[in-house]
Image (spheres, rainbow, N blue to C red):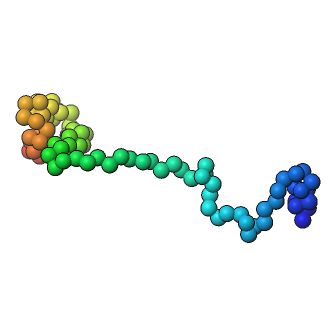
Amino acid sequence: MRSAVSASAAGATVLSKARVSSQPTPAATPASRRHRKLNLSPRATSVRKPQGKYPGIMRALPAAGHERLRKVAREQGLAAATEFAGTLPL
């Protein structure tokens, strides 16, 4: 009761518990990341798949295999390099 009286004396409005929203304020919720949808052709998708696998393969290989894999990727392409990586010892 005292808080309601002191708040009204200070000029602030007091909300009853029934009127308080249970949802967080917009500033408290994290902003959702919006990504644009890429409408890729099947050919473009097939080109991008080896491009995504290549860095993961390089991370898994020991440093000695990196240069061999880079050479195959330069000469024959990333698809051939990902196949070649399967033959390399880990």
Position in image of residue 77 (x %, y %): 10, 36
Q: Is residue 89 visible?
A: no
Going by the image, does 13 lie left or right of 85?
A: right
Kindly indicate the quadrant of the structure image that contains residue 69.
top left
Going by the image, does 75 lie left or right of 47?
A: left
- The N terminus sits in image quarter: bottom right
46 or 11, nearer to the observer = 11
Total numbered circles: 0
Position in image of residue 26 (x %, y %): 60, 52
26 or 39, nearer to the observer = 39
- The C terminus sits in image quarter: top left
In the rendered view, tell whether residue 32 sits above or below residue 18: above
Position in image of residue 59 (x %, y %): 25, 40
Kindly indicate the quadrant of the structure image that contains residue 84.
top left
Instruction: State the residue at coordinates (75%, 67%).
Output: 17
Q: Looking at this view, name the residue that lies furthest to the bottom.
A: 18
In the rendered view, tell whether residue 18 sits above or below residue 63: below
Instruction: State the residue at coordinates (92%, 54%).
Output: 9
Going by the image, does 36 lie left or right of 31?
A: left
Q: Looking at this view, name the residue that lies furthest to the left.
A: 76
Going by the image, does 16 lie left or right of 24?
A: right
Instruction: State the residue at coordinates (63%, 54%).
Output: 25
Position in image of residue 41 (x %, y %): 18, 47
